[in-house]
Amino acid sequence: MISISSRKVVKFLAFVVLGLLSFSLLGQLSKVLWGGDRQWITSLAHIFDLDREKNLPSLYSAATLFICAFLLAFITWVKRQNRDRYVWHWGFLSCIFLFLGADEWTSIHEKTIEPLRALLGNNGGGVLHFAWVVPGAVFVGVIAIAYLKFLTDLPPRTKRLVLLAGTLYVAGTLGMEMIDGAYANQYGTRIWGTQGLRLSLEAGVYTLMMTCEEALEMVGVLIFIYTLLSYLGDCIQEVRIRIDADRNPVLSDLVVDAAMPNRGRA
């Protein structure tokens, strides 16, 4: 029997998040102060840079989003066994997080910035400096409306945690992204030089803003993982796997004993 403690998982992930945020700040400071003469410092700083892709922070973020997708897919499977009314809602959420995880690693949204600027007639100024936030905000609004009844029917504690996690994640992904974009557009030449970040007040403020953005996203996902694990713990009593030796020792049956919430609950 394998037992998973949602609290222990969250404590471990919180420790990882704190480490990544700290190393990113230290790396940026070291790169600005000594990176010009020591290439290895710059290379090491890039590994932990929250403002870069395909490094340790982005790997962590992508992995945790994929974990959310997996947990949502498992809940979907359980709901399907019980013919729950919200099975498609859970399933679509799993697909959303699967895409978010892939986007976190490959930066699909970044590739849409220039085409969207041209489409919107925006030259990159103001809060729409990162123009992908426009379709992003529309998508969040549509999902919020479509999932209103689903959210209402969640157990009270789960509902509060989902709202908290979603608020933090959207505040980081969209809210801080717009603030960062406006700041970068106004002070770009004072933030970046030919060797990367400059040693300036504007660069320091931008680094703190980026750290805040990533922190909000990471903490939001962390809380959502805790929520899903807790929800599964409340809903599922036991998972039993039975192997039939007469069928070339292959998995032949997977039984889930579920103690689902009251009828009508999500």
Image: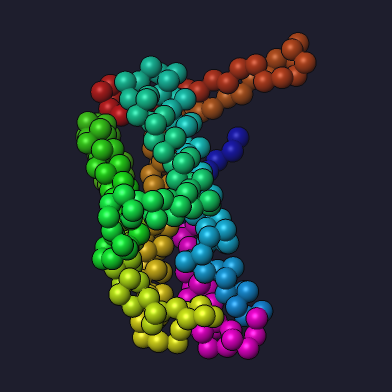
Q: Residue furthest top?
A: 246
Q: Main secondary structure of the magenta part?
A: helix
Q: Where does the image place residue 206, in percent across and percent down from the top left?
A: 37, 75
| Residue lying at 55% horizontally and 68% vertically, measured from the top left | 48
Q: Is residue 142 left or right of residue 62?
A: left
Q: For this rendering, which residue is in front, 184 or 223?
A: 184
Q: Where does the image place residue 248, in percent across and percent down from the top left?
A: 77, 15
Q: For this rendering, which residue is in front, 91 or 39?
A: 39
Q: Is residue 219 above or below residue 49?
A: above
**Residue 88 visible, this angle:** yes
Q: Where does the image place residue 1, in percent across and percent down from the top left?
A: 60, 35
> Quadrant location of the C terminus?
top left
Q: Where does the image place residue 164, in percent across and percent down from the top left?
A: 29, 51
| Residue lying at 46% horizontally and 41% vertically, measured from the top left | 99
| Residue lying at 42% horizontally and 20% vertically, measured from the top left | 80
| Residue lying at 28% horizontally and 66% vertically, measured from the top left | 125
What range is drawn magenta here?
A: 11-39
Q: Is residue 21 magenta?
A: yes
**Residue 235 visible, this angle:** no
